[in-house]
């Protein structure tokens, strides 16, 4: 189901505490900080689901993304939103629970949201929502790295991806695993 501008979101403060609610369109228009999830979906070969958003999207239309996900609805947990958004955008049901990795605050002059990053394995054939996804493919890490400078990416997804790479490097080096 495609999410509308009327969907009610929890509005949160700089420490991710709920301070109110607003329709999604209002939250975007007034730059009210809300919550979002980013789910990196890999197939059984380890390739990453990459897609181009439709031109009708409220935010970052027609750009590429290496995450599925979206906003967290009012009263919804990050974990619930991660599974819901992953299943909706991939067009599957019965995904395992996405694994939470870390959270970060994404803020630009235009946008503000708390972001939870997840990873999930998708062994089910995907059938992405036509309202959400204009094109898709599973790419290797190397193929994705090559496309980073060639394609126009959603800025929040790109920020989340760079934080994910730093988080993975830190964990490989024995660090705490929190992105900077």
Image (cartoon, rainbow, N blue to C red):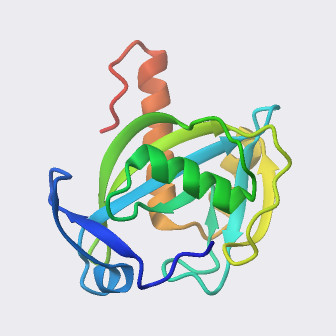
Image coordinates of residue 106 in percent, x first then y, are: 32, 59
x 49%, y 28%: residue:
168
Q: Is residue 122 left or right of residue 64?
A: right
Q: In the picture shown, does residue 149 fall above or below 43?
A: below
Residue 67 shows up from this direction: no
Image coordinates of residue 122 in percent, x first then y, are: 74, 40
Q: Is residue 87 left or right of residue 43?
A: left
> Of residues 37 and 179, which is closer to you in this image?
37
Q: Within the image, what quadrant is residue 156 found in? A: bottom left
Quadrant including the N terminus = bottom right
Q: Within the image, what quadrant is residue 19 found in? A: bottom left
Quadrant including the C terminus = top left
Q: Within the image, what quadrant is residue 179 found in? A: top left
Please identify the residue farthest to the top as the structure is shown: 174
> Of residues 180 and 26, which is closer to you in this image?
26
Q: In the picture shown, does residue 114 fall above or below 121?
A: below
Residue 58 shows up from this direction: yes
Image coordinates of residue 14 in percent, x first then y, are: 15, 56
x 82%, y 60%: residue:
127
> Of residues 72 and 57, which is closer to you in this image?
72
x 66%, y 53%: residue:
87
x 76%, y 63%: residue:
128
Q: Is residue 172 left or right of residue 95?
A: left
The mark tally for this picture is 0
Q: Is residue 166 left or right of residue 67?
A: left
């Amino acid at each position: 189901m495609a999410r509308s501008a009327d969907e009610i979101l929890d509005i949160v403060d700089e420490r991710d505490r709920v301070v109110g609610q607003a329709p999604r369109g209002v939250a975007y228009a007034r730059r009210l900080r809300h919550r979002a999830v980013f789910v990196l979906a890999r197939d059984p070969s380890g390739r990453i689901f990459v897609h181009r958003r439709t031109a009708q999207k409220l935010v970052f239309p027609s750009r590429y993304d290496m995450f599925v996900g979206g906003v967290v609805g009012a009263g919804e947990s990050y974990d619930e939103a991660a599974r819901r958004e992953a299943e909706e955008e991939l067009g599957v049901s019965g995904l395992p629970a996405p694994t939470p990795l870390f959270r970060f605050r994404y803020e630009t002059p235009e946008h503000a949201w708390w972001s939870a990053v997840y990873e999930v394995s998708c062994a089910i054939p995907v059938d992405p929502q036509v309202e959400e996804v204009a094109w898709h493919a599973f790419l290797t890490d190397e193929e994705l790295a090559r496309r980073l400078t060639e394609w126009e990416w959603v800025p929040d997804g790109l920020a989340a991806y760079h934080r994910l790479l730093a988080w993975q490097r830190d964990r490989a080096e024995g660090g705490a695993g929190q992105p900077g």
